Amino acid sequence: MSLNTAPNLARPDDFYESLIEMHRGLDDAPSQDVNARLILLLANHIGDHEVLIEAMQRARAGVDPAVSAALAEAA
Amino acid sequence: MHSTPAIDYQQQRFMYQPCLEQTRPADAALHPVVVIGAGPVGLVTAIDLARQGIRVVLVDDDDTLSTGSRAICFAKRTLDIFDRIGCGQRMVDKGVGWNRGKVFLREEAIYEFDLLPECGHARPAFINLQQYYVEGYLLEQARQHSLIELRWKSRVSAIAHHADHEALTVETPEGSYLLKARYVVAADGSRSPLRKMMGLESVGHTFRDRFLIADVKMAAPFPAERWFWFDPPFHPNQSVLLHRQPDDVWRIDFQLGWDADPVLERTPERVIPRVQALLGKDAQFTLEWVSVYTFSCVRMDRFRHGRVLFVGDAAHCVSPFGARGANSGIQDAENLAWKLAFVLQGKAPDSLLDSYASEREFAADENLLNSTRSTDFITPKSAVSRCFRDAVLALAREHAFARRLVNSGRLSLPATLHGSPLSSADSAPFHGAMQAGAPCTDAPVLTDTIPGWLLPHLGDQFVAMIFAPPASLSAALLPALVRLTEGGLPLRLLFVSGAQASAEDHTVLSALGDSAVQVQDIEGQVAQRYDGQPHTCYLIRPDQHVCARWRTVDAAALAQALQRATGHEPAAQPATVLDAA
């Protein structure tokens, strides 16, 4: 299995709104906590280790030049 | 019955005595092995070498055993090793056996584990026993070996390398002398003076955190389990670990944070209120030992440097969460001892010692990985690491998946030596954990109708374990097996059968002589744990690790695997790396 990056969200605009709404009224620190819990819940739902690693690499790509270069080479 | 008065091992002092090098230097010979450091690892090394028939000089810079309880958790594998070298029962009789642990978040138990969920093992997953008892019992065991010479108050201050030996300068109360040995085992601890003398380092992660050990003596209602708290009400925002030791002593380990003052924090004025916070204001207890410590997860790049072999903390250090320090050091000792003996006795080339380094470096990496992961969870190194740790703990109260992520220490298990150059690859499919490189697991057996355990039958020589009654082997095979048992690389035969030995079996056994034994797999657990089908054959090393296995008994294959296991064959066909996860 590999990471599905094709459009897959059932209700994209509703999802995005809910994601922002999830943080409503929170300062940065509690927002970080909520994000961390969300990542852990979703990661457990996905389960597949390779998919999770690929998602981490995609998430990190562009933030660290060395990682994005390695990703480009692998593609 | 009367009991002998208990020995206070912390108060014992050992007399310095001048040695032959000082009194009659002309008669001082080149020693086969000098072991530096009479801690648990040095003592096991010396005893195991003596068991293999090797003369050992064990030098120690001090004249005492461990001060304070220090390493208290001794794992099943270590107990199996203590059994093999003859002092396991004493340790288990004195120690507090335990298998279970609980993890608390604040006041709530969120995770429980059982480290030995199956029956049919002689020993528990762990005992807790103060290091001074372990050292005391090992020392008394060492003194029963005439091949071991102990030299107290003997500090190694210099080393000179020569083509065929090492020359150590030893400082004593009566001046210094030169001590020469073909091999030197450095078991001189995490700050290893010998490592520094040789200009070598141990590198890796350090952690910015401090911990307080308070050993308190009290009558307490807690069970013999490992209890670990994250953020308990009696010590907010930090962790606490509780262990029961013998003599009504309890180990309480408080996380303090990096900013804590290590001198101030060990004063009774600071320690007593922390203990009272856990036990209640009115609790009756006395402080036995207090220590504030920091730690790092480091190792030497290579554990072998010519004729010098580094073992235990001298070679690698881990955080205490997981009990992987002393336990892994004792595994180093037993991995090295038989190899040194074989090399010194001319049964194996010097290159066999390279496999000590490669196997135990691999094991150290596994211990370091587990220890570093636990420490990253207990002592997060960054804001985001702390954020995820706290998120895991928050979710763990409600969600089972998050409990599996809570890491308060993954407790010491022996490494399976994947890819060892001494192992031979499987040529047929097998199930279960007993692959080449694995430490042998125990199981109940009957010997002449007397209940016992498998591991003592493996002993400390090479063993061919054959899942068949001896009378079922072909007449042609027996002389070939006899030749193997009488060869330059001695081999013992252990027959494992479901049924009791028959009269025919006894006839074959007596023809095979002292080197053959038959046991009855009374509960079928040996066959189950080793995937033993009729005529399955295992070759097992003197340190009770599997090095080869087959579905048929083949004397030529056994002979070849024995050659490989003793470093005689170049590792041209490396063993398959099995399931390296």
Image (spheres, rainbow, N blue to C red):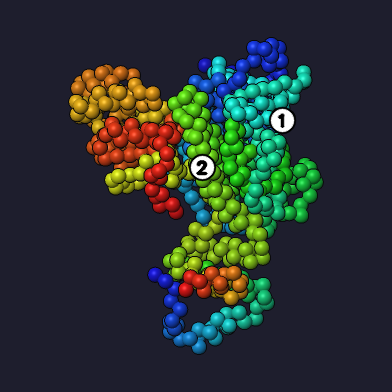
Q: Position of residue B1 (x, y in %)?
A: 52, 16
Same-chain status of marks 2 and 1: yes
Q: Which mark is residue B358?
A: 2
Give the farthest residue toward the bottom: A13
Image mark 2: chain: B
Q: Position of residue B487 (x, y in %)?
A: 35, 23
Q: Residue at x 52, y 74 (%)?
A: A72
Q: Earlier in the sequence, mark 2 or mark 1?
A: 1
In what element is the residue under mark 2? helix
Tell me the residue at 19%/25% (across/down): B475
Q: Nearer the viewer, residue B203 or B160?
A: B160
Q: Tell me if mark 1 has few (under 14), some (14-19) or many (20+) residues whose alpha carbon lies within 10 angstroms of its own.
A: some
Q: Is residue B133 above or below residue B259?
A: above
Q: How many marks?
A: 2
Which x, y percent locates residue B90? 52, 26
Residue nearest the observer in this picture, B245 or B171: B171
- Whole-angstrom CA distance, mark 2 to mark 1, is 27 Å
Crowding at dot 2, Cα within 10 Å, few <14 / some 14-19 / many 20+, comes out as some
x%, y% of residue A7? Answer: 44, 83
Asked if residue B146 is positioned above or below residue B575 in the image, the reply reads above
Q: Amino acid at mark 1?
A: Ala
* Residue B245 in view of the camera: no
Q: Quadrant of residue B464?
A: top left
Q: Quadrant of the N terminus of chain A?
A: bottom left
B52 or B183: nearer the eye? B183
Name the amino acid type tagged 2: Ser
Residue B345 seen in the figure:
yes
Position of B3 with respect to B272 (left or right) is: left
Left or right position of B8 against B502: right
Q: Are marks 2 and 1 in contact (CB under 8 Å)?
A: no
Chain name for mark 1: B
- Which labelled disc corresponds to residue B158? 1
